[in-house]
Image: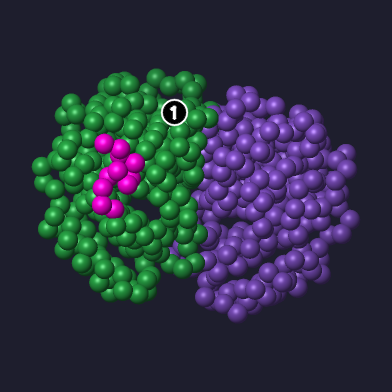
Chain colours: A green, B purple
Amino acid sequence: MAVYTEVNEAELASFLADYDLGHVLALKGIAEGVENSNYVLHVDAGYFILTLYEKRVDERDLPFFLGLMEHLAAHGLNCPQPVRNRHGSALGRIAGRPAVIVTFLEGMWHGCPSVRRCAAVGEALGKLHRSGANFAGYRPNALGLDAWPALFEEARARADEVRPGIAEEIAKELTFLTGSWPRDLPRGVIHADLFPDNVLFVGDELSGLIDFYFACTDELAYDVAISLNAWCFEPDGSFNITKGLAFFNAYEGVRKLTASEIEAFSILARGASLRFALTRLVDWLNVPADALVHPKNPLEYFDKLCFHRKITSTRELGLLR
Amino acid sequence: MAVYTEVNEAELASFLADYDLGHVLALKGIAEGVENSNYVLHVDAGYFILTLYEKRVDERDLPFFLGLMEHLAAHGLNCPQPVRNRHGSALGRIAGRPAVIVTFLEGMWHGCPSVRRCAAVGEALGKLHRSGANFAGYRPNALGLDAWPALFEEARARADEVRPGIAEEIAKELTFLTGSWPRDLPRGVIHADLFPDNVLFVGDELSGLIDFYFACTDELAYDVAISLNAWCFEPDGSFNITKGLAFFNAYEGVRKLTASEIEAFSILARGASLRFALTRLVDWLNVPADALVHPKNPLEYFDKLCFHRKITSTRELGLLR
């Protein structure tokens, strides 16, 4: 949401000396990305995004993220493309931070997606999972099931400030999920954060996926559950089965869910709800009341968790088979 | 430094329906402007800046600001140009806020300007003052001499937290300036905030002036003093007379200072120092310690005030005549 590291002229010039992009015409810090500093960079060669990785991103993960974006684009999925310098490297340093130039993707993100856009996202997620199958990189999910108890401990003492009784509810849910989490589902590269602000559209055409900085190796159907949660609920909290139908249908047009994925889906969806409820809860309790940037409401995801507890079949979510 | 108002698709589409700019290709919030929300807007017609005016800007002032930018550009000074819609209006509304589309200016701003760039700024300021002479708009300076006592009262009780004894120093300076402020100098449109972050360069060429939202009608030489302070001191606080010389020389290449302006310059420079010391002091004392955006140090401008108290002639600043 901010530019954390300012880039000065000398640093930029020295960084760009390794690239064949021409002169700097403009550099504007943009209000995107919570973890990184991002700039729109205009050079003779065109418009690009310059990203400086801040402390919350582990530098050792960068080859995975950059390699994944290159791999997906090579398989026809539109996402920012790291620009390699004359030495063949996509990753450099600027102002003491690891930095990369990626292509500028056209498109806007939209807060309240139409049915048609839910379908477009389902299809793109299917392609991501299919193309990711032969990606060599591996990165464990730092915010997967194993990480949730520690997140909960960070928030436990004050969780009931947000809604009375919620700490006990979470404790129970954690016990349930730990005991029943499926262990042998198809795994591969997942985006893990495919929310509306990470999907760009020009008109109704999906123009690209962005922000791969939570991407990791995990259960593919868990990623489907994360996206279903992010795209198919209305602002009032109700589930829109027409959107669910369009989303699943388009996903399965590219990659069919297996019988065990469908069977385990309810548990995955509860986990996908709890994961975002927990990270939002921690942020909610730790952001100063007078901060410019207001954290997202964790209750939205607790309500999704409650919804998924009541679901008895994926047919109720729109997966009609 | 942030995007305060999010723009959604429907609002943007409805706003753009009045313009002949084509389809929206991209919209990215940028981390510029403390008072407004700014976006890079890419449409078929090219790249533009979309600005939404937030509460700190008085809507009644907008015709002055927009008219001034059009006037200056018509006189050959490069600055953002308000784009008029089909009804001939540059000012519309989006998301409940007054909003305007302006042209995208190439260039970057630079923190530590070279002598050559100080000269370029002096020349541009001269052109601004000369071109502004026949601008019909009028706007009083809301942060001029008359406003300083009230600013001081906001900070007085805690001012000594910043540097012991400073409250008394300011009180004395205010008394002095109120008693000796020149009243009959040439007046006209001034930028009033021509700091390095408001001047863009492509290489060493000045490509444009931005951020006219403090512009007003006031003494021209007071604006010269503001810019001299902003451009000709080094990061360690020392005054660089070579930069002062280049700045004055280039300014006078366009507009000669009058004898009374030169005579009063020391008082204007003290006032220009105090004005920024006071607004920074108020911000410094009112921003929460854990805020993401750190306010600028007021002591930088107290030190400039002390410097100008010791100056006995504008020759010591680089005005060699």
| Residue assigned mark 1 | A207
- Give the residues drawn in magenta, as a range: A311-321
Q: In percent of the image, x 24 and y 61: which residue is there? A: A151
Q: In the rendered view, tell whether residue A70 sits above or below residue B279.
A: above
* Amino acid type, mark 1: Ser
Would residue A109 be visible to someone looking at this image? no
Q: In percent of the image, x 13 and y 55: which residue is there? A: A180
The main secondary structure of the magenta stretch is: loop
User: Residue A95: percent from the left, percent from the top?
Assistant: 37, 42
Q: Number of marks in the image? A: 1
For the residue pair A204 and A309, the one nearer the viewer reads as A309
For the residue pair A109 and A222, the one nearer the viewer reads as A222
For the residue pair A153 and B167, the one nearer the viewer reads as A153
Q: In percent of the image, x 26 and y 68: which residue is there? A: A169
User: Residue B24: percent from the left, percent from the top?
Assistant: 57, 30
Chain letter for mark 1, please: A
Q: In percent of the image, x 27 and y 45: which residue is there? A: A314
